[in-house]
Amino acid sequence: MRRRSFCGALTAAAVPLSVSAFQAERKSGRLKISAVEIWRLEGRRETQAGAHRQYQVQPLHVYDELRPKPYREPGPGGQTTVPVTALYLKIKTAEGLEGLYGPIDREAAIVVDAQLRGFLVGKDPLAGETLWDQMYRSNRHARHGHFMMAISAVDNAVWDLRGRYYGVPVYRLLGGPTRASVEAYASCLGYSVEPEAARTRALAFKAEGYRHQKWFLAYGPGSFAEGLAKNLELVRVLREALGDEVEIMFDAFMGWDLNYALAWAKPAEKYHPRWIEECFATEKVDSYAQLRRSTSIPLASGEHIYGRWEAQRYLSAGALNVLQTDPEWCGGVSELVRICTVASLYDVHVIPHGHALHTPVHVVASQPPMTCPLVEYLVIKMSSYHHFEKDPPRVAGGQIALPERPGFGIELDPARIEKQTRVQWRG
């Protein structure tokens, strides 16, 4: 009963209001947020046992005791059942209209419930600019981190609510679409970087229609010359396997320093990578700028950049070719759109980090292809990330078709939900 009630209420809320109802509510100002709820969904899914656990280089790997042994992909294993949980944010109005967004991070959910919930009740969910600015001004720590992640979750849920109110997808509210489908690049986190395994996987993605692939480098300064040689070997193997018609990108996840990045970049240049991503910690803007001036390989970063002001610091320093701000973390759809405008002044691409799919697809679909050419598709993660949804975004031939359902079109599947609980963190 609880499962049916939760999903059924969402289905009912997806029906757009009539024009007369819209006009009456606009005149009366009745549409107000009445409740902000966090729901934990639980279920199970099938997966391949023991596979696809290749690590990427981490900042802590400079310490010998914290650096894992080289990964070796196991042989084919059987299927196993694993638990799945996800948090979804629901924003209700007294008139019965609801917005839904998720999955959201636990860190964001805690702040939403403990700090933003009471502030949001009574606010107008259609006044997006006002709501975002008031959330941002409500806390001294709103500039970045968990508070900005919470703002992002609320902003995204409110965009879904507005889409349901007007009966259109979010990308249409943002001014799109600018294309019939959004191109995705295959992001290969978790796949083995052993040369033959990587070659086989890369060729399979090429055959599936992906024109861009990103691979996650496993070694950093703590692995010395041997690790550097392995990182460069991966670049060579992929370029020789894929030819020049497929773009290859690489991610170092803040695990390098400037000297190491320069040592990798010089010999890697001849293989023409599309970019090298997040070589350094986010605060090291000058290191990004120095590396960009020193190599022909484009630089990408931004998943840990929060808000247009921090993005502007990078762009004005000439530090990046590709900005990867994440709408789950940077301030939501509203702030990502503003960041796109700033980036367009510098001819810098915005290719959002692929922590999720709904928001990046809608924002990219609303922006000129010159500004937002691609979305990231984390192949392993996305195979189960939207587990509880009936029809999540899917890639076919390297493309994601634009949804036509109102809002983000999120509809939960009762058959996949074994248990649901409203969770609370009261400050």
Image: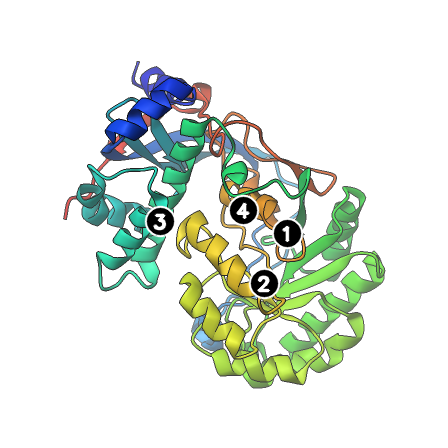
Q: Quadrant of the N terminus?
A: top left
Question: Quadrant of residue 308 in the image?
Answer: bottom left
Type of amino acid under label 4 = Val
Q: Are marks 2 and 1 in contact (CB under 8 Å)?
A: yes
Earlier-in-chain disc, 3 versus 1: 3
- Checking the image for residue 238, the label placed there is none
Q: Is residue 258 left or right of residue 120?
A: right
Residue 73 is at least partly visible in this image: yes
Q: Which residue is mark 2?
A: 344
Q: Position of residue 105 (x, y in %)?
A: 37, 47
Q: Position of residue 338 (x, y in %)?
A: 47, 57
Q: CA distance from mark 3 to mark 1?
A: 22 Å
Q: Which residue is mark 1?
A: 368
Type of amino acid under label 3 = Glu
Q: Which residue is mark 3?
A: 129
Q: Nearer the viewer, mark 2 or mark 4?
A: 2
Type of amino acid under label 1 = Pro
Residue shown at 36% from the left, 16% from the top = 4
